Image: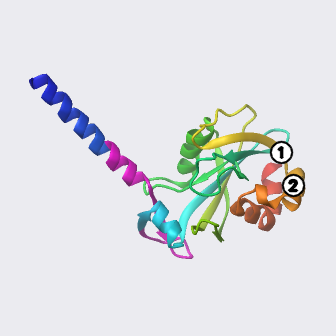
Amino acid sequence: MLQISLFVLKYKLFCTFGNMKEKVTNYVILVDENDNPLGTMEKIEAHEKAKLHRAFSVFIYNSNKELMLQQRALSKYHTPGLWTNTCCSHQHLDETNIEAGKRRLQEEMGFTTELQETISFIYKAPFDNGLTEYEYDYILVGEYDDDPNPNPEEVNAWKWMKLEDIEVDIRENPEKYTEWFKIIFEKHKSEMIKSST
């Protein structure tokens, strides 16, 4: 009887702390236009209220100067099935941008590599479902020549593409790509080309 009670207690503690951990990490860091932190907010609430928050976007190139793209999982709560950069997400309070980028690269694409912080900028992109991405976004760049091992809960497909081919495809098929990727590509194409060389 005592063993059963201890098992139930351990199970309850596991569930409680598991849920707490999920809640603690399922937030974004609210910032001003100079990236000064203002507090935190639950991720979906921040997207519902279009609150400016800190984020990062990872761009991985191979030795052929091709960019690794991912197609977002069909179960994503926004922009499912659209093509975008290698991975992107939000920093935790105790992380540097590089640490956050490596963590999310492993979680989404199943590998990690050295990353370099390049540029940062603010963008705002409303979605059809009423949510809005309003981010202070850091661009992180790295190199990798092997195949990824993507998480199917995050990624539906992946491919390598040359920047000039991406440019043509975005122009001809803009509906296939996420808004933030199109914004980054259009406004910061020269920095991306420099990063890939």
Amino acid at pointer 2: Asp
Q: Which of 129 and 118 is in front in this view?
A: 129
Q: Is residue 132 above or below residue 71?
A: below
Instruction: Say which element carries label 1.
Output: strand
- Left or right of 80 on screen, residue 2: left
Q: Nearer the viewer, mark 2 or mark 1?
A: 2
Q: In which quarter of the image is the N terminus?
A: top left
Return the residue at label 1. 161
Seen at 80% across and 49% down, the residue is: 196
In the image, 143: left or right of 193?
Answer: left
Residue at mark 2 to residue at mark 1: CA–CA distance: 10 Å
- Identified at 59% across, 42% down, the residue is 108
**Helix, strand or loop at mark 2:** helix
Residue 92's x, y, as percent? 46, 55
Q: In this figure, which colouring scheme has been used for the structure?
A: rainbow
62 left or right of 2?
right
Outermost residue to the left: 1
Circle 1 packing at 10 Å, graded few (<14), some (14-19), many (20+), is: some
Residue type beneath disc 1: Met
The stretch in magenta equals 18-39
Question: Circle 2 sits on which residue?
Answer: 169
